[in-house]
Amino acid sequence: MHISKSLIPILKNNPTEAKIKSHQLMLRVGMIRQSSAGIYSWLPLGFKVMKKIEKIVREEQDKIGAQEILMPTIQSSDIWKESGRYDDYGEEMLRIKDRQNREMLYGPTNEELITEIFRSSIKSYKSLPQLLYHIQWKFRDELRPRFGIMRCREFYMKDAYSFDLSDEDARFSYNKFYLSYLKTFKRLDLSAIPMEAETGPIGGNLSHEFIILAETGESKIFTDKRIFEVDSDGYKPEKKSLEELRKKFETYYSVTDEKYNKSEFEKNVPSEHRIITKGIEVGHIFYFGDKYSKPLNASVDLQGGKKDFVKMGSYGIGVSRLVGAIIEAKYNDKDEIMKWPLAVSPYDVALIPLISKNETSNIEKANNIYDFLKEKKIDVIIDDTEENFSSKIKKFNLIGIPYQILVGKKSEGDLLEFKEIGKETQQLSLSQIADLLIKQKSKI
Ligand code: 5CA
């Protein structure tokens, strides 16, 4: 991509309406644009990041055997009346009437719709377990949408649903998602900790929120700092392995404020290990048994002719919120430097030539480098504008592409200035740079 032809509307200063760093940065470098309160358009830079996050989320769902589907954003109110949530959900639900005066709604979540699909498709216990997911826009008419895409009204969510015969099998499914979440967040270079949580309007009595620490987060948490040392590597989506993993995490007290109990916290966590802080909820998983299958009559035939309601769980990841959460975790707002993990960076490398009236040879040189990198399947963005060299570098430090190639006065002969954000500049040849980038990309 050539900057001169791109839609990357950079602002000179931080927008005053944005209160937290992710919101400021996303507006400043033109990743999103507010369309109305809590509703955003995703511009090329932001959209590329979100799509890369989505891909990682999808790959980790597929690895535990979940099947991808796509349900609509608009739902009929009928199934919500069957489950009893139509009235309970309250003003957060956007209700719409179609031309036949039928009551429709913009889905805030999909427990009812997926249960309806299940009950009309699956008849026998032999088809269980069923793990289904989709990645789709949701709408919640939040009372106070704020912090940009962190708490907005329209947001992009991965929601998965599990259907099992017994309580024990359902807990096995729950644990598969628990592991898959740890793996997903690790690939995003985030340290997200599972914390016991309340179930709210989704229901049930077993639930974990996956939380990353951030002062600007909206969840208050009470935890033992040793939980951050727990390693989830080496665990497999097998019953025993998953139970061990859960046990390992549960050695350490770790809850959100609704589950907090002062005396338990003080009894279980030595004072030097206590952390009381705030975090961002990037995922939330729930087990709620037959809360929906019973009223919606989702049952399967058992051996011997009997029937039973299936046991269900649901599992959400805030895909659009994760874009902001990664910024909160990686952006140094004091020095105005962002560094995306390569796996989700909008581009692999930024090519920054010094171009001025007296320096015309650099653009040709940079264009050749650009073509060479493109040939090697490296996603490169070139700043082909005549903007001042140091402001170009400042701009790319904000955008946060982890690698920069500077084609300036210092790049003489075959060597180029190559910089990984936050590290020393190196003098490397173009083929050395390409090899290094290809190697880093192969690790994603
Ligand atoms: N049906 C369940 C699981 S699929 C569910 O809806 N869970 S949830 O309400 O916890 O949402 C799942 C995730 O979506 C949250 O962990 C959060 O990361 C994200 N999310 C929820 N509300 C918003 C919002 N208003 N703005 C941005 N992301 C949100």
Image (cartoon, rainbow, N blue to C red):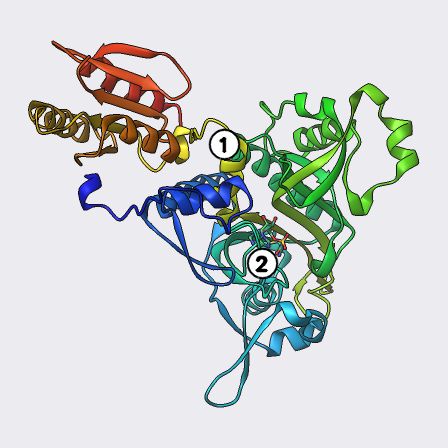
Residue furthest bottom in the image: 100
Instruction: In the rendered view, tell whether residue 211 sits above or below residue 334.
Output: below
User: Would you identify the image quadrant in which residue 193 lies?
Assistant: top right
Per the model, the C-alpha gap separating discs 2 and 1 is: 23 Å
Q: Residue at x 58, y 23 (%)?
A: 233
Horizontal side, residue 229 vs residue 223: left or right:
left
Q: Is mark 2 within 8 Å of ligand 1?
A: yes
Location of the C terminus (image quadrant): top left
- Label 2 SS: loop
Instruction: In the rendered view, tell whether residue 231 sits above or below residue 259.
Output: above
Residue assigned mark 2: 145
Residue type (three-letter) at the residue carrying disc 1: Asp
Location of the N terminus (image quadrant): top left
Instruction: In the rendered view, tell whether residue 93 sits above or below residue 162.
Output: below
Q: Position of residue 306 (x, y in %)?
A: 74, 64
- Label 1 SS: loop
Residue assigned mark 1: 333
Q: Residue at x 69, y 65 (%)?
A: 292
Sequence order check, earlier mark of 2 and 1 = 2
Crowding at dot 1, Cα within 10 Å, few <14 / some 14-19 / many 20+, comes out as some
Crowding at dot 2, Cα within 10 Å, few <14 / some 14-19 / many 20+, comes out as some
Closer to us: 44 or 252: 44
Horizontal side, residue 247 vs residue 237: left or right:
right
Closer to us: 339 or 337: 337
Residue type (three-letter) at the residue carrying disc 2: Pro
Horizontal side, residue 360 vs residue 25: left or right:
left
